[in-house]
Image (cartoon, rainbow, N blue to C red):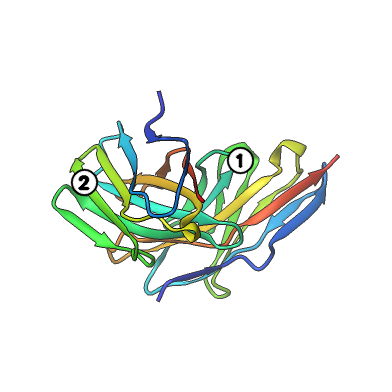
Amino acid sequence: AQSVAQPEDQVNVAEGNPLTVKCTYSVSGNPYLFWYVQYPNRGLQFLLKYITGDNLVKGSYGFEAEFNKSQTSFHLKKPSALVSDSALYFCAVRDSFGTYKYIFGTGTRLKVLA
Amino acid sequence: DADVTQTPRNRITKTGKRIMLECSQTKGHDRMYWYRQDPGLGLRLIYYSFDVKDINKGEISDGYSVSRQAQAKFSLSLESAIPNQTAFYFCATSEGTQPQHFGDGTRLSIL
């Protein structure tokens, strides 16, 4: 069965420091991996995805993520955090077999402190 | 205009009432999904549909029903609402390997 784990409920980081939000997954076959961000009273907004190719994926707003097949991880990173990055972040996985069902992690709240 | 529109955005109702949440999309996607979001639980799939004639149960379908009236419209109903169905509800669409596109959600409170 597919699953996604986001081990940290909350991550605090000082503005200007690098940030990492962790995600590990379990899926049959090759994974399709996604990161989304949610601001208050809004739907989820797509940040980046890994389907195939380079393990380092670059996305919106300066975010990037590294796919690590041996560790089944897809951690979200940003070299220099902004206060405006404070939000709820979700990792999601979909298998490659065509079920088109997406499994979401429980979310990590990122707080960037000025 | 938003690609995925959910109505209403907020709803307060009483236990036992029938409620319908509506979702419409202009993206032309065949696949549509309904999720429920609760604090600390992430998003859980209620129902999904791959075309007008296809409806599938998700992980938490009990107490809910759906209708896919057209490619662009996918409605979620609570036949007899109960307080533990208080949550945020999100509709999403997808196509191929593209990411899902979400509406801005409905905040539903059941008293």
Dot 1 falls on a residue whose secondary structure is: loop
**For the residues carrying marks 1 and 2, which lies nearer the camera in this image?**
2
The disc at residue A39 is 1
View extreme (top): residue: B1
Are both tags, 1 and 2, on one chain?
Answer: no
Q: Chain of mark 2?
A: B
Task: Kindly identify which residue carries mark 2.
Answer: B68
Disc marking residue B31? none
Q: Is residue A10 above or below residue B9?
A: below
Q: Is residue B15 visible?
A: yes
Q: From the viewer's side, name the closer residue of A102 and B108.
A: B108
Task: Place residue A51 in its image quadrant.
Answer: bottom left
Q: CA distance from mark 1 to mark 2?
A: 28 Å
Q: Residue at x 30, y 31 (%)?
A: B26
Q: Position of residue B50 (x, y in %)?
A: 22, 52
Q: At x 37% / y 49%, what residue is drawn?
A: B17
Local secondary structure at mark 2 = strand
Decide if residue B9 is on the left or right side of residue B21.
right
Q: Chain of mark 1?
A: A
In which quarter of the view is residue B39 placed? Answer: bottom right
Q: Disc 1, disc 2: CB below 8 Å?
A: no
Write the residue at 63% across / 45% down: A63
Place of residue B14 in the rendered image (x, y in percent of width and height, measured from the top left): 45, 48
- Above or below — where is A25 with respect to B98? below
Q: Is residue A37 left or right of residue A16?
A: left
Q: Amino acid at mark 1?
A: Tyr
Residue A5, by quadrant, is bottom right
Comparing A70 with B80, the one in front is B80
Could you classify mark 1 by the number of other residues whose Cα lies within 10 Å: few (under 14), some (14-19), or many (20 or more)? Answer: few
In the foreground, B105 or A8: B105
Mark 2 is surrounded, within 10 Å at the Cα level, by few (under 14), some (14 to 19) or many (20 or more) other residues, namely many
